[in-house]
Amino acid sequence: MLLQNQIRCNNCGDTPFSSHRHHFSYCKCGDVAVDGGMDYLKRTGKPDGYTEMSIFMEDHVVKKLRTCVNEKLNNDLGKICGMMRVLRDEGYQVNKPEIKNGDC
């Protein structure tokens, strides 16, 4: 399942995304564009002009995550922890970016 349809422009660094079908979105400099929402991937511009940032996930994992979100006995933190366990158990890794001095 496609969860996020997004690219990063290698020229200006902008990260246009497409939120729904036929939502065509250019980067700030106009070199590249993205389209298709969660229905399909369409790119405009040179293939080396962007870096892919889209997020895909198997349907059964999305179903398990939805179960965590809909859990009525857990508070928000409990839901987040449940979702993180699902991702870990399914082999996904969430990597924390390196923090430099002065960054939050």
Image (cartoon, helix red, strand yellow):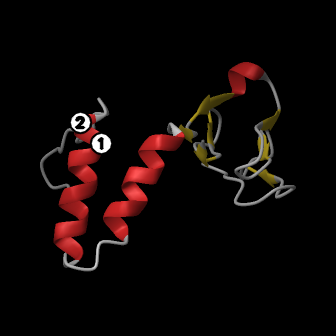
Which residue occupies the foreground of this view, 11 or 88?
A: 88
Residue at the disc numbered 1: 87
- Secondary structure under tag 1 reads helix
Q: Is residue 98 something that shows in the picture? A: yes
The residue positioned 19% from the left and 75% from the top of the image is: 74
The residue positioned 37% from the left and 72% from the top of the image is: 70
- Secondary structure under tag 2 reads helix
Q: Are marks 1 and 2 in contact (CB under 8 Å)?
A: yes
Three-letter code, disc 1: Leu
Residue at the disc numbered 2: 89
Question: Residue 69 placed where, x, y %?
Answer: 35, 68
The residue positioned 38% from the left and 51% from the top of the image is: 64
Which residue occupies the foreground of this view, 2 or 32?
A: 2
Question: Residue 32 placed where, x, y %?
Answer: 77, 39
Three-letter code, disc 2: Asp
Q: Quadrant of residue 71?
A: bottom left
Kindly report the distance in space between the C-alpha atoms of the residues bearing marks 1 and 2. Answer: 6 Å
The residue positioned 80% from the left and 46% from the top of the image is: 30
